[in-house]
Amino acid sequence: MQFTKIWALIALVCCAISSFAQHQTTIFKGTIYLDNQPLHGATVTIAGQKTISDSKGLFEIKNVKSKNVRVKITSIEAETWIEDIILVLESVNHHNFNLVKSNKAIDEVEVLGLTKVQEVSRQAYNVTAIDATKLYNSTLDISGALDKVAGVRVRESGGVGSNFNLSLNGFSGEHVRYFVDGIPMDNFGSSFQINNIPINIADRIEVYKGVVPMWLGSDALGGAINIVTADRFRNFVDASYSYGSFNTHRTVVNAAATSKKGLTFQLNAFQNYSDNNYKVNVEAADIYTGAYDKNAVVKRFHDKYHNESVIAQVGFVDKSFADRLLLGVILGQNYKEIQTGARMKSVFGQWHRRGSTVMPTLKYRKTNIIQGLDLIVNANYNLGKEQNIDTVNVRYDWYGTSKPNGTNGERARQLYIYKNNEGLATTNLNYRMGENHSIALSNVFSTFNRKGHDELNPTNAAYEQPQKTNKNILGLGYTYGIQDVWTTTVFGKLLTQNNKNGALDTTHNRFGYGLATAYYIKPNLQIKTSYERTNRMPTPYEMFGDVENQEANAKLKPESSHNLNLGTNYNFAINKDHRFVVGANLIYRYASDFIYNRLNNNQSKLVANNREGVETWGADADARYSYKSWLTLGGSITYQYLQNKQKYEPNYSNISPLYNDQMPNIPYFFAHGDASVIFKNFMNEGNTLNVGYNLVYVHEFYLYWPSRGGQKLVVPKQFTHDFNVVYSVANSRYNIGLEAKNVTNEKVYDNFSLQKPGRAFYVNLRYFINK
């Protein structure tokens, strides 16, 4: 039955292609350079039509009617270019333009173009884009940048390398999917997580809230994060090193070299290290004397983390057979000491984990295979392994004192070595049927197979049980749009997943669909709405556990949700000096068989469970103001209410006392604010001093169900203040940054009682050269 549906979708695409294919028209394409480097964001005007050059300086205008045209190119960085060109009709015309750098002051230039970040935010989806390039001189990782977005809370269990849980409009954990350049990160391994990937890897970060574009090929329930890597420069070196509190070291090197014939080599390498030996407030008892302190202040003594990662790729760009063809390998390793369990009442002194990633990769992209048809193919397979090492028969207290513990290890004596062999293959086809119509087909196949053995318990049959899953997501979408007037996309997704856990063999099939539309009341005022009936399959880690603090639950059911978004964006200027950008969104979600994490029976681990229904109402807003080119202010605010809609509980005949309760352990009201002052040509021409401030507020929220009275407990409200100073020399070739985080030393918590670091200071050095 499923194969019938798949072939029906493919047949529909083929029919659409053959039915809508149009006669060849005159197309004008080109590449814009500034000082021999691709120029992004330039506005190109030809025969009354306008477009914007992309990150590679490329632009394209279709259906040009005239043979003789005047080309006008404007950019904030370059002198205006005007040229008369004779075109060959009913053909593809390609021209290169090398603009001259402008000597005008910034407020004398007419800005007509949009940056790539602005273009993404104008999509019909509820999406926010972060310009990562503005954060390159900080010590932030990807998760730190996301924490500034309206509707987003990144919740970590500790310091560098700790477990994290991103909440997006109230949906968290596996409800939110992560991508790099549109490729799912599901199989990247423990060395590649958003809280250990440095911000310098990204060009921008796209945050889709609720409805997720079909081309991402995801079964996300609550949204998606797409990390778009930097490829603006063909020959460059970007290196940085930072050092700070708790003996924290971070190193990042990004480089690329491209020949005139299109042979390219690209390298991304990064390293994180921290002792994470910050002070925490805990209930502590001496393991020998029993002396008890309800509010002891102790250092975390077994929380060291480090990871080292390399992404290397070689191939060709801008060739007749491929716009991009890259073969590569991702290598990574990490070491993580485990200080606590799911709560800080559990403390460990020698239990630790190791992990590695060895992943061959393939990336292929070609536009206009035939006129209007684009193809993107990606594939990878992770051959890495993980180790859970709990081999000492002792028990620790918070003072670092140990005591013999029979033969039980610290939690469960084992030396479990296993491989989560995970493979992924994605294909995207997009066919442009004239100026206003396009149709897209997407397919994502993923596989998971855990194999391992416990060297301390070689006869334990539990580790020999099959733990496998195969998942396929097939999507079809159609888009109609009139530039700067109206755009609409409709799509459908067919999901199939087969799971094997020991003798248990299950197969799930789901079909989802959605729509996203946007209308421009005027060019700078947009309203948009989107709806999706979405489905999410349980992940391998929810079904089989993570062999640390996540307990297995192989009987999880897929969850589904009605997601509805309504939003608006408005950017305007009072005059040339005062500019504003504001946005607001309303959300509604109703999720069935909602998967959430709770503490297991002995409260030592988390376990995923289904709830019959969860309803969410929410709103968020953000605003940004800039004065000339030296002052920016911005902020966001989020409110979300998640309500339990499970009316009856297992083994309980009456209406559940938890019915209509607010879902516990989820922040529902939080805000962010920032300000920066920029001093250009500070002390010398070409030097820039940037002074910044960040504020994060999280309102108090319940740890347990509100109906439980005195047992519900409260995570207290939290204010944190961060300051930063960045000095850039020689047009940003040399940079030094100083950061002070949580300067008031606030006690901050994200998950249960797990305390995060207090006051910390960092220095960051960065060097950038581009030729």
Image (tube, rainbow, N blue to C red):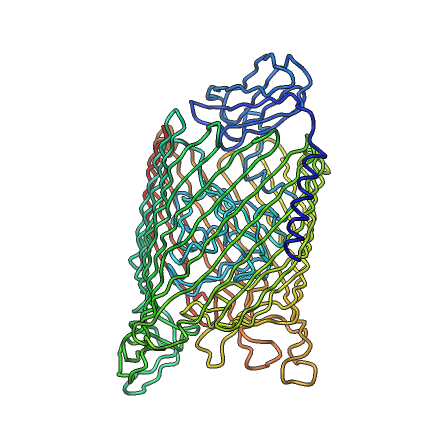
Single out the residue that lies furthest toward the bottom.
Answer: 289
Q: Give the x, y percent position of residue 139.
A: 38, 49
Compared to residue 752, the image places residue 403 above or below, namely below
Rendering coords of residue 304 (x, y %): 31, 63
Along the line of sight, the residue nearer the viewer: 644 or 216: 216
Looking at the image, can residue 758 be seen? Answer: no
Q: Nearer the viewer, residue 7 or 513?
A: 7
- Which image quadrant for residue 136? top left
**Residue 537 percent coordinates (x, y):** 57, 62
**Does 157 appear above or below 567?**
below
Q: Is residue 483 left or right of residue 201?
A: right
Q: Position of residue 713 (x, y in %)?
A: 53, 76
Which corner quadrant holds the N terminus? bottom right
- For this rendering, which residue is in front, 286 or 507? 507
Q: How many marks?
A: 0
Vertical comparison of 676 with 410: above or below: above
Q: Please report the residue visible at 54 percent of the width from the left and 17 percent of the height from the top.
A: 81
- Which residue occupies 65% across, 45% down? 10
Q: Is residue 59 above or below residue 521?
A: above
- Residue sitting at 33 percent across and 72 percent down? 454
Quadrant location of the C terminus in the rendered image:
top left
The answer to whether residue 563 shows anywhere in this view is yes
